[in-house]
Amino acid sequence: MTNRFEGKHLMRDTSNRILGGVCSGLANYAGGDPALWRIGAVLLALFANVPVLLVYVVMWIVVPVDRSVTPQSGNGCLKALFFALLIVPLMFLLVPLLLLAAMMLGLVGFGLHSLMDTTLETMTRMLEPTGFTLWIYFIGAAVMLVLLVVVVSRWTRGERQGLKWWIAVLVLIPLIALAATWCLAMGKSVKQWISSLPQQSVEWSEEAEADRQASADEYLKSWGWRLIVNNGEGSVASGEYYDGTQDYAYLEGRAREGKKLLYTAELCDSTLEGGTYTLTAAARADAPGAYLYVRIGSSARYPDEKPMFEKTVPVRALGREGGKMPDWEGDAKGWSLRTVHNIPLKAGQTIYYGITTDPRLTRHGSSSLTWFSACDFELVREP
């Protein structure tokens, strides 16, 4: 029986090639359709975990070309598709590298951010590849794959003119993705830096005022205060404390033009022992209408509900001059210490106290009050 391989030599057939003519050479040597060899190579690469690409490259280098045939260009689209199917796994491996490169470039962009804000936690949070930034990475990888198919297709068809521009665009895609990520990171840095500037340096707007109001309300909540009602401008202020401390925050309500000031802020406690208590607080106002109040068993949130105990003390209306504070000589900038005595509290009862301008709580009707300030609330059990 004649050996089917007798007189044959394994050579690459470049007349019927898609890449290097390896599969067509195997078909000529062993028999079969070259297309079936190519399909088998792709299936082995994708599903059988065989290093087909490595074997192909080695054979492309080692196996000689059959010089007895005239090299011809095959179907460019099929070549590009075959090549793309082989490198798809590699492209997915390149995505994490693209993410890492973008994050490293983002660190350079955050150099400016580190000068403005040295908080490492904030920097790390902004560098997380999530949301819109992650879409930039994946879209960039997809565009690179499409361009790579185009480049390979034109190369295999022999269309070399203008090919360098396609390659340049292919190289620019990751750079564009990195630049977009860098711009997003820098935008977040600058926005955060601007938001941290003093309020006086930011031009007033309704949106900025709403943001400042929300921040002040959150500050009150962090100290246990409940802002029950406030139709004025702002709920917290600083800079005019009686001893000159500029960054000391205190409650402050300011009426809007043409409106009566309606403001109630409250603390509560249900863990105190039974006994008689005294409430003290520093306060000031520009006109009568602001009152310290104490209620046992009923919050100011329900002003019409009758509490077990209720008492109010008016805030002295001295404006921003005069006043008297303990252990302080001279002008107290309108601040005075106000006191509510003889508060009877039983163990287990809830006590509510704070400051209000609500006529339903003060029982004194509306007033011409336009602003007030209050702070240093202290509830002490009498001996």
Image: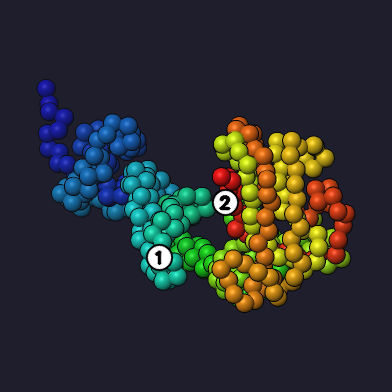
User: Mark 2 and 1 residues: CB-CB less than 8 Å, in contact?
Assistant: no
The three-letter amino acid code for the residue at tag 1 is: Thr
Figure quadrant of the C terminus: top right
Ranked by sequence position, the earlier of labels 2 and 1 is 1
Q: Quadrant of residue 257?
A: bottom right
Left or right: residue 66 compared with residue 161: left
Left or right: residue 339 compared with residue 197: right
Can residue 306 be seen from the camera position used here? yes
- Residue 283 x/y as whole percent: 68, 62
Left or right: residue 16 compared with residue 309: left
**Local SS, label 1:** loop
The three-letter amino acid code for the residue at tag 2 is: Trp
- Figure check: 272 above or below 222: above
Figure quadrant of the N terminus: top left
Residue to which mark 2 is pinned: 223
Q: Nearer the viewer, residue 281 or 119?
A: 281
- Residue 270 x/y as whole percent: 60, 37
Can residue 265 be seen from the camera position used here? no
Residue to which mark 1 is pinned: 118
Q: Nearer the viewer, residue 226 or 103?
A: 226
Q: Residue at x 59, y 46 (%)?
A: 382
Q: Quadrant of residue 175?
A: bottom left
- Figure check: 62 above or below 320: above
Q: Nearer the viewer, residue 375 or 238?
A: 375
Q: Residues within 10 Å of mark 2 (few under 14, many from 20)?
A: few
**Local SS, label 2:** loop
Q: Residue at x 59, y 75 (%)?
A: 329
- Residue 73 x/y as whole percent: 36, 53
Q: Residue at x 61, y 32 (%)?
A: 348
Give the number of marks: 2
